[in-house]
Image: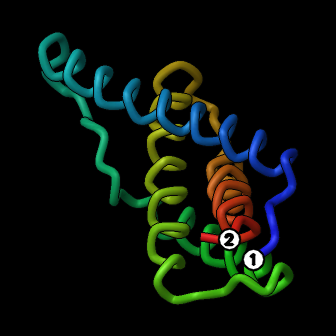
């Protein structure tokens, strides 16, 4: 097995930090909003934009894993579900701060994360 490119590892770590912060922020905003607002929509990781993020993550992972010859069904589950859920969290946090957040931005974030996971051998 060959060692992964250090640049890919750094990019993957940066993506994971952003995804983790978005996940924690979405949970915190959801809990805070339930206490303050009567008509509040809590974050749902499998909401309406999840299918779009999941499709983008599947495409990103498939392209990267096949290109790097690391495709395996075992790593595909984590490599697709985590970026898709992180993209919905980012979308929720961004939409709370800026209502005009484009849906395609979350799909790009999911595809980028899944693509980075696809390039790394797991």
Quarter containing the C terminus: bottom right
Please tell me whether residue 90 is drawn above or below residue 78 in the rendered image.
above
**The one of 7 and 102 positioned closer to us in this rendering:** 7
Please tell me whether residue 50 is drawn above or below residue 55 in the rendered image.
above
- Provide the secondary structure element on which disc 2 rests: loop
The x and y percentages for residue 88 are: 47, 48
The crowd level at tag 2 (other Cα within 10 Å; few <14, some 14-19, many 20+) is: some
Where, by quadrant of the figure, is residue 19 drawn? top right
The residue that disc 2 covers is 121
Residue at horizontal 29%, vertical 48%? Answer: 44
The x and y percentages for residue 29 are: 32, 21
Image label count = 2
Query: Residue 84 got which mark?
Result: none
The answer to whether 87 appears left or right of 3 in the picture is: left
Residue at horizontal 63%, vertical 35%? Answer: 101
Please tell me whether residue 116 is drawn above or below residue 31 in the rendered image.
below
**The one of 68 and 59 positioned closer to us in this rendering:** 68
Where, by quadrant of the figure, is residue 16 drawn? top right
The crowd level at tag 1 (other Cα within 10 Å; few <14, some 14-19, many 20+) is: few
The x and y percentages for residue 18 are: 59, 32
The colour style of the image is rainbow
- Provide the secondary structure element on which disc 1 rests: loop
Select label 1 or label 2 by which is in front: 1
The residue that disc 1 covers is 1
Asked whether the beta carbons under mark 1 and mark 2 sit within 8 Å of each other, the answer is: yes
Residue at horizontal 53%, vertical 69%? Answer: 80
């Amino acid at each position: 097995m060959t060692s992964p490119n250090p640049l890919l590892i750094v990019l993957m770590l940066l993506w994971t930090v952003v995804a983790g912060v978005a996940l924690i922020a979405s949970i915190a905003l959801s809990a805070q909003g339930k206490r303050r607002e009567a008509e509040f929509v809590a974050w749902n990781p499998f909401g309406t934009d999840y299918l779009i993020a999941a499709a983008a993550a599947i495409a990103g992972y498939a392209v990267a894993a096949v290109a790097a010859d690391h495709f395996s069904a075992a790593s595909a589950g984590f490599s697709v579900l985590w970026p898709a859920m992180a993209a919905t969290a980012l979308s929720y946090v961004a939409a709370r701060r800026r209502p005009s957040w484009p849906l395609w931005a979350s799909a790009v974030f999911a595809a980028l994360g899944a693509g980075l996971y696809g390039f790394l051998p797991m």
